[in-house]
Image (cartoon, coloured by chain):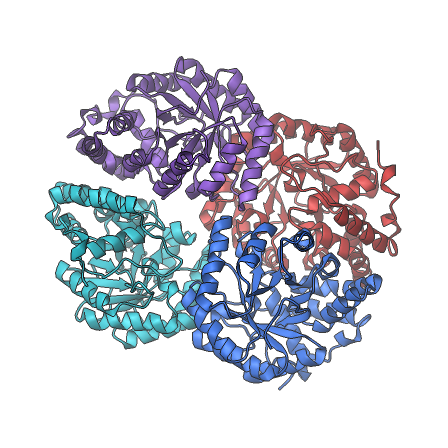
Chain colours: A blue, B red, C purple, D cyan
Amino acid sequence: MKLTPQAKGTFAIAPTPFHDDGRIDDGSIDRLCNFYRDAGCNGITVLGIMGEAPKLDGEEGLQVATRFIRSAKDMQIIVGVSSPGFAAMRSLARGAMDAGAAGVMIAPIPSLRTDDQITTYFKQAIEAIGDDIPWVLQDYPLTLSVVMTPAVIRRIVMDSPSCVMLKHEDWPGLEKISALRGFQKDGSLRPLSILTGNGGLFLDFEMERGADGAMTGYAFPELLIDVVKLSKAGKRDAAHDLFDAHLPLIRYEQQPGAGLSVRKYVLQKRGIISTSAQRKPGATITATAKAEVDYLLSRVARVDRRANLQPQSSAAG
Amino acid sequence: MKLTPQAKGTFAIAPTPFHDDGRIDDGSIDRLCNFYRDAGCNGITVLGIMGEAPKLDGEEGLQVATRFIRSAKDMQIIVGVSSPGFAAMRSLARGAMDAGAAGVMIAPIPSLRTDDQITTYFKQAIEAIGDDIPWVLQDYPLTLSVVMTPAVIRRIVMDSPSCVMLKHEDWPGLEKISALRGFQKDGSLRPLSILTGNGGLFLDFEMERGADGAMTGYAFPELLIDVVKLSKAGKRDAAHDLFDAHLPLIRYEQQPGAGLSVRKYVLQKRGIISTSAQRKPGATITATAKAEVDYLLSRVARVDRRANLQPQSSAAG
Amino acid sequence: MKLTPQAKGTFAIAPTPFHDDGRIDDGSIDRLCNFYRDAGCNGITVLGIMGEAPKLDGEEGLQVATRFIRSAKDMQIIVGVSSPGFAAMRSLARGAMDAGAAGVMIAPIPSLRTDDQITTYFKQAIEAIGDDIPWVLQDYPLTLSVVMTPAVIRRIVMDSPSCVMLKHEDWPGLEKISALRGFQKDGSLRPLSILTGNGGLFLDFEMERGADGAMTGYAFPELLIDVVKLSKAGKRDAAHDLFDAHLPLIRYEQQPGAGLSVRKYVLQKRGIISTSAQRKPGATITATAKAEVDYLLSRVARVDRRANLQPQSSAAG
Amino acid sequence: MKLTPQAKGTFAIAPTPFHDDGRIDDGSIDRLCNFYRDAGCNGITVLGIMGEAPKLDGEEGLQVATRFIRSAKDMQIIVGVSSPGFAAMRSLARGAMDAGAAGVMIAPIPSLRTDDQITTYFKQAIEAIGDDIPWVLQDYPLTLSVVMTPAVIRRIVMDSPSCVMLKHEDWPGLEKISALRGFQKDGSLRPLSILTGNGGLFLDFEMERGADGAMTGYAFPELLIDVVKLSKAGKRDAAHDLFDAHLPLIRYEQQPGAGLSVRKYVLQKRGIISTSAQRKPGATITATAKAEVDYLLSRVARVDRRANLQPQSSAAG
């Protein structure tokens, strides 16, 4: 099923699991899919920035996406196709859609500066991949150094009918959600799904500002799902209570550069991926950091028993 | 009293208070000093990045620093003297020391890239201000785009006997504290105070990694002081319990660009500064954001009654 | 006489001359003014990027500007007032105008990214300095990392009646001149003087694209003046012949970072400034580089006898 | 024949020729190879920054490299394999060597800052591609924003016996060549070929500083070859006379972003590539710019009759 502007809920940003020798770990991909489905995710986003996508060559990228798509069954898969060039972007986008993806996600290249450069870039990108593929606009200035105003996002969306979703991770970004929702109220912007990233660090208020859900890789997607639901149900205090219990760990996981090693460590502890290995260049997690994460997990577990993890020896074999 | 490598505890990063028309607000400076003293701060850092220092001209900078120094009485004042040029840096540094500052703080200019460029820059800076002024090295890659390895920090410190402190706000930065403390254990680095910034977002673990205290501008310095003390006393769970209660607000305040408007809003609510005005260009805080902060304050107040603020109308007049 | 949109010809970008110990060298300022007047310059721009402006503190900046203004007599002086903050910008701008400057020049701060950020910045800058001061917009992406489209420049100019000139040094920038002149033809942009920088590297074609003259610091302003005049007179081949004879040296002088040391060396050789000293941090010119410049000068002198310099011992004492 | 540290002379940086519809133009590749061979080039570098390499997907990259290798026959081909990830770098590097390449060229990824990050990156890159492939280190700070000191280059070279060449295009960079040659004199650096880029803008002096030749894409490789030879033969004035005749065009071609469109236009005029088309995003050359290039060509032709090009209608069909 293809992605639409009505998409909502929680899309997990999946890491790409590797074996210790750097080969892609298909078994862990299958377990990740089961895990996300059991948790109640609405979809999975693969080959994002946290998915180590640039470390895969073209064939590997399609191979990973395809494995996720098959294993995810009825869950929607969004495939990150950001690339320095449109030829590689097109190859992966068309290949992924042929394999059954629900849509693709595109981030701007870091050299873009002016409003016109940004809007032209996305026009050319959609020309390249074809206007029949539903796509997600990724807005992530902290990492990409490209700054898009709400008005520029509106131009991109209005220029491209196949743009169905914004992955919002400007930082700070709460006012941006309000501005975009304001554009929709005044009729200048058409319907658009807004899912938020930034490791979940502001999910509590992002929902209140009008987000449709979360798209991030926190190792407890259950928490994202619950906060989204509680917030949608208007249970503000309950949403914040639960969110706040996880916030110390969310914050720890959200550290740029180091966060992925934390996330993979927790997913390994949860028995989902078989090892926390990253391809080079990648951060490793020290023994001290592991102990800090373990301590944070034990504290989360006082409130949320899903964080009550077995010792690491029980990891999937 | 001059700053030494034995400095520890909590140094508040003070905002520069303005009247609504942009004039410097001396009365609010005095109230800030009393507030920080009453809270138990060990010192105050003025004219830092959050102190809107680049918005002051040379005379105003010295005027603000002097007012803080006089009003602070026995508290140590560190004056930020970072500047695009050494002449302005020297003027302010010597003027501030003559007025009674405990030391100065220097950040690298954003164009520095190689290890040698960085170490040469600090050598020339100290030549310019004189080697008789105790100084704090500010390491803030997220904002300054200058990346210093632990080994480069060691070179800077070992080259300059007057360097007494590191303001640590690399992000992520926990491993950097461990690396520097490791250098001291192996004898390759002399004693050095390490106070941590980043809005306090990682203070809990920074203390456990070996920091000597906090140097940041969170609007509840009482919290920083308590966490530093509990952590030093080995009361780990108590330190984290208190820290976690404030974390949702700490996180909200730490948003780059927007954070200062939040901080000034809370300090105004607390009756300490008379208005949250910033000089241009500056972020303003929307009504929605104010309501979010108020909600966060009410939640903190459930655990820490110091956050139980009177309505804003009681702010200092 | 104040600067107007009708300004044209050649404005020399003056270096700031220092003594070897770093003090400002007033005698060399006077000789520079005489030199530029005798050469036939229409004006002088001081405290630009090549003028080491950030290395002066606030008082020194005004002192240098004032000395140039007095010494320049009837020549127009434009004072660079770019600054990280508006308070310092205002102090220098008002002080310089009071001392008799013809106008000021403002470059954007490097952090600006979006079209709106850029136009807002200049609006606030003009609010700060006052709308009664004629000002020059500096467009220098290579060094400042701020990219302004022709449409953004038009917005800035149309928003601010006191903007009278563009210092054009986008690179590449020929099409930008054509685009702006096109805006004027279609009536969407009012009259605006365009003088070009980039060390003169493209002056030949910039004139043909519609520039009104040169504003750069090549150590032979006579060449700039002649090329501007020949080009204005429609003597295309003659303009290029002369330009091409100097191009090897222009190119050598235009090297980012190193160029100022070359320029000061040549001006010293010409007997105008007493030493090539820069304030720290600054590049020095090696013996090999000096010999290369001497060789280039000897080659220029075959065509243009003004480059037939006496040995360096004859420099002003 | 594999590349060695004794390589010298002129390696042309080849553009990747496309048909107007974006397909790779194999016929033009063959003509380029013949052209470079007839001109006397020692080798060809393909898939460099000017080769639009990021616009090709993985298969296309290898296909282009292979076509060049076959068509070049006895000329050495160096293949640019720079990539955001090591998997794609390895695929292309091994594929190109299997197809008969003489070596590969690697540029650093733009995010590298510290000396250690840079040296570690190249260590991991060589681990990835294998230490049996001769490789060229590309040092191009202006475009890549990575700054390597001479000492860092020395560490990289001494750490990796398979590094045989530096493509030098620091800017300014003359002192860097002198520093590296100085390291070799003092015995701290082993033999290393240094070929220079930067569009040839400083080739005259780069040769005198100790470069072994040129590696750049100026559309008259004959000029590069002649300057290299004259300089090696100690005919200084003759080398500069010829160089200076071409400098106005070299300068015009070297404009960042726009230069490739000029280069392809001239190669098309010379009848070598069938169209000047670039893949998107790419600059186009305006009619005014074409006329400027034509004028420059006519001026070069007064001195160097090889620039006396037939009208464009004679381009290869």
Which quarter of the rendered picture does the N terminus of chain D lie within? bottom left
* Residue B252 drawn at (x, y percent): 73, 53
Residue A316 versus residue D126 in the image, above or below? below
Whether residue A249 is visible to the viewer of this picture, yes or no, is yes
Which quarter of the rendered picture does the C terminus of chain D lie within? bottom left
Residue C191 versus residue C111 in the image, above or below? above
* Residue A92 drawn at (x, y percent): 47, 73
Give the residue drawn at x 19%, y 53%. D312
* Residue D88 drawn at (x, y percent): 41, 71
Whether residue A15 is visible to the viewer of this picture, yes or no, is no
* Residue A196 drawn at (x, y percent): 66, 62
Give the residue drawn at x 59%, y 78%. A275
D37 vs A77, nearest the viewer? A77
Among the 4 quarters of the image, the one containing residue C22: top left
Query: Left of B61 or right of it: where is A86?
Result: left
Query: Left of B223 or right of it: where is C54?
Result: left
Among the 4 quarters of the image, the one containing residue D241: top left
Find the residue positioned furthest to the bottom: A317
Query: Left of D57 or right of it: where is B207?
Result: right
Query: Left of D230 or right of it: where is D93?
Result: right
Give the residue drawn at x 25%, y 49%. D200
